[in-house]
Image: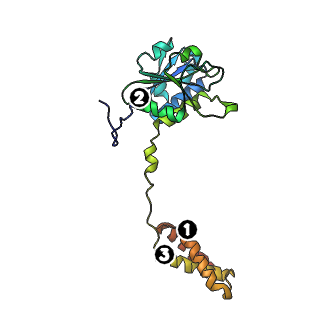
């Protein structure tokens, strides 16, 4: 039984995502794809009709040897996705016969995550030169595209894998958690900061006697808008003390 999140929805299982590279030829791209998988916590790489020399050279890719070592090779796409309940192809559109639903990455990623909670999912990436063929796409339930600009739709294979996996791995709920905040500086700290800054400015000739009152209010308002925490207020006070000491000696 799949684990559930606090909101009752199913938790995706990382091992259920299978990254399938169809006819890859460049060892740098294969290595970059493997590294992106390792970065985002996905480790099941499958290669279909890979250029043997390229795959052999890619196995030396930095920090992704585990993904490449365990990668499996298949003679046909049908065999590579046989155990998957959902097969999604990536495409930049181009001269293709699109008889499938085409979804943007943002929406498609959510559907993939939902399915991963209960069954294996294959995410297909085509060769560097031609992408997925119409024959390859016939194995897919639907297609997904990264929203690139119309004039330059195709992406480097390794980059495309990284972008897709980021969308699948990211947790939108995490952005709702505010960063740990430091203690806000007290009014007393702010007033001492104001006094020191006013004194330094007076020594420098910035503050004129006849305008001292309005200048003090401007300085006070300016400092409050800075919304300093206790630590930063202390740093500022230390700097102003040193400046004032230099001005007076």
The span from disc 1 to disc 2 (Cα, nearest Å) is 47 Å
Q: Quadrant of residue 97?
A: top right
Quadrant placement of the N terminus: top left
The answer to whether residue 207 is visible is yes
- The spot of residue 212 in percent (x, y) is 64, 85
Give the residue at mark 1.
226
Foreground pick, 160 / 49: 160
Q: How is the image coloured?
A: rainbow
Question: On the picture, is 9 further left or further right than 200?
Answer: left
Question: On the picture, is 4 further left or further right than 131?
Answer: left
Residue at image position (44%, 41%) is: 171
Give the residue at mark 3.
189
Q: Which secondary structure lies at badge 3?
A: helix
Foreground pick, 182 / 132: 132
Q: Which secondary structure lies at badge 2?
A: helix
The answer to whether mark 3 and mark 1 are in CB contact below 8 A is: no
The answer to whether mark 1 and mark 2 are in CB contact below 8 A is: no
Q: Which secondary structure lies at badge 1?
A: loop
Give the residue at mark 2.
115
- The spot of residue 77 in percent (x, y) is 50, 14
The span from disc 3 to disc 1 (Cα, nearest Å) is 13 Å
Q: Quadrant of residue 163?
A: top right
Residue pushed farthest top?
75
Residue at image position (51%, 23%) is: 142
Sooner in the amino-acid sequence: mark 1 or mark 2: 2
Q: Nearer the viewer, mark 1 or mark 2?
A: 2
Sooner in the amino-acid sequence: mark 3 or mark 1: 3
Q: Residues within 10 Å of mark 2 (few under 14, many from 20)?
A: some
């Amino acid at each position: 039984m799949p684990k559930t999140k606090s909101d009752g929805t199913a938790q995706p299982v990382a091992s259920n995502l299978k990254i399938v590279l169809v006819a890859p030829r460049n060892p740098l791209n294969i290595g970059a794809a493997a590294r992106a998988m390792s970065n985002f916590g996905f480790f099941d790489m499958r290669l279909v009709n890979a250029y043997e020399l390229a795959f052999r050279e890619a196995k030396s890719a930095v920090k992704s040897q585990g993904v490449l070592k365990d990668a499996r090779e298949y003679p046909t796409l049908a065999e590579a996705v046989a155990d998957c309940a959902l097969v999604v192809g990536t495409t930049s559109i181009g001269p293709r016969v699109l008889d499938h639903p085409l979804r943007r990455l943002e929406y498609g990623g959510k559907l993939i995550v939902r399915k991963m909670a209960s069954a294996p999912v294959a995410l297909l990436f085509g060769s560097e030169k031609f992408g997925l063929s119409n024959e390859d796409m016939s194995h897919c339930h639907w297609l997904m595209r990264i929203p690139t600009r119309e004039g330059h739709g195709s992406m480097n294979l390794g980059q495309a894998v990284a972008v897709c996996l980021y969308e699948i791995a990211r947790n939108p709920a995490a952005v709702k958690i505010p960063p740990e905040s430091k203690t806000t500086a007290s009014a007393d700290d702010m007033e001492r900061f104001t006094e020191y800054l006013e004194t330094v400015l007076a020594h420098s000739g910035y503050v004129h006697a006849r305008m001292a009152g309005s200048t003090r209010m401007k300085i006070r308002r300016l400092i409050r808008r800075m919304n300093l925490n206790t630590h930063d207020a202390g740093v500022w006070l230390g700097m102003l003390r040193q400046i004032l000491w230099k001005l007076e000696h």
